[in-house]
Amino acid sequence: MILAALLLASFLVNLDTTLVNVALPDLTRELHATTTQLQWVVDAYNLVFAALILTFGSLSDRFGRKGMLLAGLAVVGSASLAGAFTTSPAQLIAARAVMGLGAAMTFPATLSLLTNVFTERRERAAAIGLWGAIAGVAIAMGPIVGGFLLQDFSWGSIFVAMAPVAALALVGVAVAVPASKSQVAARLDVPGLVLSSAMMALLVFTIIEAPAYGWTAGRSLAGFAVSAVLLAAFIAAERRSPHPMLDVRLFRNPRFSAASAAVTVSFFTLLGFIFLITQYFQFVRGYSALSAGVRLLPVALAVAIGSVAGTQLAVRAGTRLIVTIGLVAMAVFYGWVAATTSATLSYSVIAVQMVLYGLGLGLTSAPATEAIMGVVSRNRAGVGSAVNDATRLIGGTLGVAVLGSVYASAYGSRLTVTTPPKVPGQVTALAHQSVGAAYAAAGGLVRLGRPGLGSALRLASTNAFLHGLTIGALVAGGVAAAGAILTAVFLPAQPAEPVRDPADTAGDETETGRSELTPKGSLR
């Protein structure tokens, strides 16, 4: 019951990462949202989530993980329900930001509670494997659930549907999950909380905005520079603090730092993959939102299998081998995609490719997460979980931003060369915005009695999209290959002796190596 309740809470947060994307066309029609507003409907959630995740991971350790989880679920459910009844893009963006706040309160607590309930390594590995499986399945199922609801209901239905799921998870946590918090009575690390929130917020904001303004533009470089300064200040503050929210010396441990890098790489490729493949399915192949989502099921199922098997295999064969194999599988997938991409490629081939990718992702992220949580003391499980979650968010945000920029650049350059010279300048400019805009422009030419020119523009934009997809796949594959090399070199095969938090001076859970339930059911 504990496992089911925590997995449902994790599923809810991860589902919301991709659920809203399929509703963007409806928001354009019904709320008259601009492109910038649509971007912030998606990014407001991710920005607040990323900015506050370390803060709430630390606060959950201090004040109680169960209480933080319950409060977070209440915020997610209430904000989601409110979002369904908004009447303007600004109101919806505000609701999405509050949902991001609830996600930051919820997500770290799910993993830290799991590691405090399941303390023997094989049990912990199995629980984290299921946690990773649920996360991957939820991200892949977002477009499916959203497409299903939008077939018969308005865009608000995707937000209304979240509320009863949040309520069910809240009841499950309240009934089944024991209370848990750090046994170390330390003062609150206010400088660490402020600096970490500011650094994460600015870094993610800069990554989100960089594709629009240019990666080498002054504001982008300034954002990255100030983020680096804030990071240095955070590290300095944590090293001086007698009770830091995050013991930065953990990053000296290669099992922690190399595993964190592997998680970043895996989610860089995952969110980049979803960004590219959904456009391919909907624009090039002409599938509806629901049909495109259903065709992602091979990825979801393969991630689930790979996550559950990966953590168990890591216990037996070593984390280094399994994570490296997973990253190699993802690199091979992207190379295969780059070599075979076409507008008529059989879906059976695409499905096999997606299975390979999903297995690779599961074999990478779940064992790497288990490695991270095996390093931190259970008194600091909340902030340890938050570090793992932050690497996911940064990796995913970078994946969409970087691969989106690479794709857009390759698409635009190829379209410039191949667009028929007789296409009017205004139509050409419209076609350069996106492949969807290009198809609409081509349709407009056909309706104006110029079918040959419309067909030529459509063919040119399709080939430009496939070129951009190929280049994006090569970049993602290169990142996965680099991650595999770094993992093979730096990630230890098995954990060393359990790491003891220097702040843990009381007789507590890290000393006993096992959890105990008090007569009231509270986890010590």
Image (tube, rainbow, N blue to C red):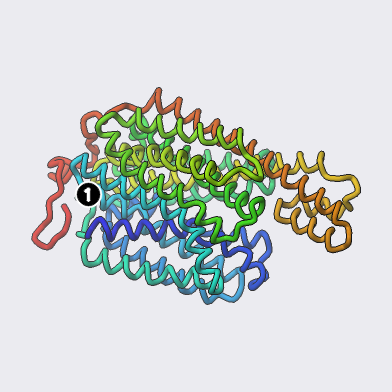
Taking 246 as reference, is 461 left or right?
right
- Residue visible at 54% across and 43% down? 350
Give the percent coordinates (x, y) of residue 211: 65, 46
Give the percent coordinates (x, y) of residue 315: 25, 34
| Residue 233 in view | no
Depth check, front residue: 367 or 450: 450
Residue to which mark 1 is pinned = 116
Q: In this picture, is 33 found above or below 285?
A: below
Q: Outermost residue, right direction? A: 422
Q: In this picture, is 521 found above or below 61?
A: below
- Residue visible at 24% across and 46% down? 379
Give the percent coordinates (x, y) of residue 396: 50, 46
- Name the image quarter holding residue 292: bottom right
Taking 116 as reference, is 365 left or right?
right
Other residues around mark 1 within 10 Å, as few (<14) / some (14–19) / many (≥20): many
Q: Amino acid at mark 1?
A: Asn
Taking 283 as reference, is 134 left or right?
left
Quadrant housing the N terminus:
bottom left
- Residue visible at 66% across and 67% down? 28
Taking 424 as reference, is 490 left or right?
left
